[in-house]
Amino acid sequence: MTKMTMEQKRAQDAWEKAAQGLQQHGKDYMNDAKGLPALIMNSGLMQVMAFLEQKGGRHVTLGLHLRQWLHQTRDTPEDFDSFMEAMMQADSRKFQAVTTEAFAWLRWLRQMAAARQGGGQ
């Protein structure tokens, strides 16, 4: 079997998470996924993660999906409290690497959620 590139891994994970999110929360999940990168650019990763956790429901699911990916690729904690603590303690290089990876994965999630929504799954 051929080794997957990082882009392929992001795409596969986003495809799976989009299916879960849409199944659990419908079109609202897709709309939230589309807006998340801009929200992170304007407010920052930690503020957005806190916002998602505070909002509850589908927002918690989206935050969890992102943390699960970051756990796999950047060795950050998966649960909310530990993730936030780790980011508060991270040096600037680690924090930037995590944020950059979040943006890269979210680009795929936006596309995959829209494709799954439009394609009838």
Image (cartoon, rainbow, N blue to C red):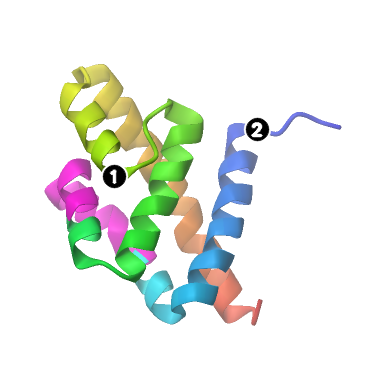
User: What secondary structure is found at the residue carrying circle 1?
Assistant: helix
Q: Which residue is mark 1?
A: 80
Residue depicted at x 44% and y 52%: 65
Q: Which residue is mark 2?
A: 5
Residue depicted at x 34% and y 31%: 98
Please tell me which residue lies in front, 86 or 116. 86
Tell me which secondary structure the magenta stretch mostly adopts.
Answer: helix
Amino acid type of the residue that numbered disc 1 sits on in the rendered structure = Phe
- Whether residue 50 is visible to the viewer of this picture, yes or no, is yes
Whole-percent x and y of residue 17? 54, 58
Whole-percent x and y of residue 110? 45, 61
Q: Is residue 48 magenta?
A: yes
Residue depicted at x 24% and y 40%: 81
Quarter of the figure that contains the C terminus: bottom right
Relative to 66, 6 lies left or right: right
Relative to 91, 3 lies left or right: right
Whole-percent x and y of residue 6? 59, 33
Examine the rendered structure and indicate whether residue 16 appears above or below residue 55: above
Q: Quadrant of residue 91?
A: top left
How far apart in space, not on screen, are marks 1 and 2 (Cα)? 28 Å
